[in-house]
Amino acid sequence: MNKMKKLPAIALLSSVFMLTTITEVVATELTETTNLVMAGTKYVTLLGNQVNVGEDAPNFKVVTESFSPVTLAEFKDKSILISVVPSLDTGVCSIQTKRFNDEVANLPSDVVMLTISNDLPFAQKRFCKTEKVESIKVLSDAVWRDFGQNYGLLIKDMGLLTRAIFIIDSDGKIAYKELVANISQHPDYDTALAKLKSLSLTVEPTDDLNESEAETLDTKVKTKVESEPKTINDSTVK
């Protein structure tokens, strides 16, 4: 009887071992980038494919706090800001996540804001409850590492995602990218938010507004947003 009860546990351990082995094999085959991001005074190696502004945003699959899959394709035709953090249980990551969570109220309804980290869903759920993070979608890349690999953000030998900001426009193209130069530093919040607002304020031609007039108005809107004074908090949490 005891032997029968132990079998599921043994099978589970075997599955975990196989998954770990597969992950290690896949990691060795990923593209490596070594000169973009530092941890302290040393460069870290990023695994995966780097993406650039103007390119189609790669699809990815992550999970919610209940392990339900979520893909980029689910946010089609929306402007998306993705805030990437190494771990929610650290000072800068916590501030970054709460800052964007607070900004959701200032944005149009067609804008989606995501936070993605490699924290386990259990830890993310605890963090959101403790810090009252309720407006931004917090998602985990811990299951498949699909997002980190597709966007070139997985830190080799650490299993964390490097700090970054991506904005994807309603056409599914990368409109903004910031890889924070040192993972202990904050991203440029104001520039990212200005870019996001400029996308959501883009004017489409209508029967009463021809294409030329729409482009002129859109340019004025973008100029106004980008000329707003920045109030970046220079203090960083180490």
Image (cartoon, rainbow, N blue to C red):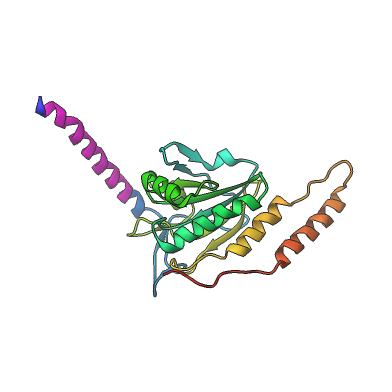
Is 217 or 18 nearer to us in this picture? 217
Residue 140 position, x and y percent, is 43, 46
Q: Residue at x 49, y 69 (%)?
A: 181
Say whether residue 16 is magenta: yes
Q: Residue at x 16, y 30 (%)?
A: 7
Q: How many marks do you count on the picture?
A: 0
Image position of 168 (left or right of 237): right
Image position of 3 (left or right of 123): left
Image position of 31 (left or right of 215): left
207 w.r.t. 217: above or below: above
120 w.r.t. 32: above or below: above
Provide the major secondary structure of the magenta segment: helix
Q: Residue at x 66, y 44 (%)?
A: 110
Q: Residue at x 41, y 70 (%)?
A: 238
Q: Where's the N terminus, which quadrant? A: top left
In the rendered structure, which segment of residues is drawn in magenta? 3-24
Say whether residue 198 is magenta: no
Residue 6 position, x and y percent, is 15, 32
Residue 229 position, x and y percent, is 69, 69
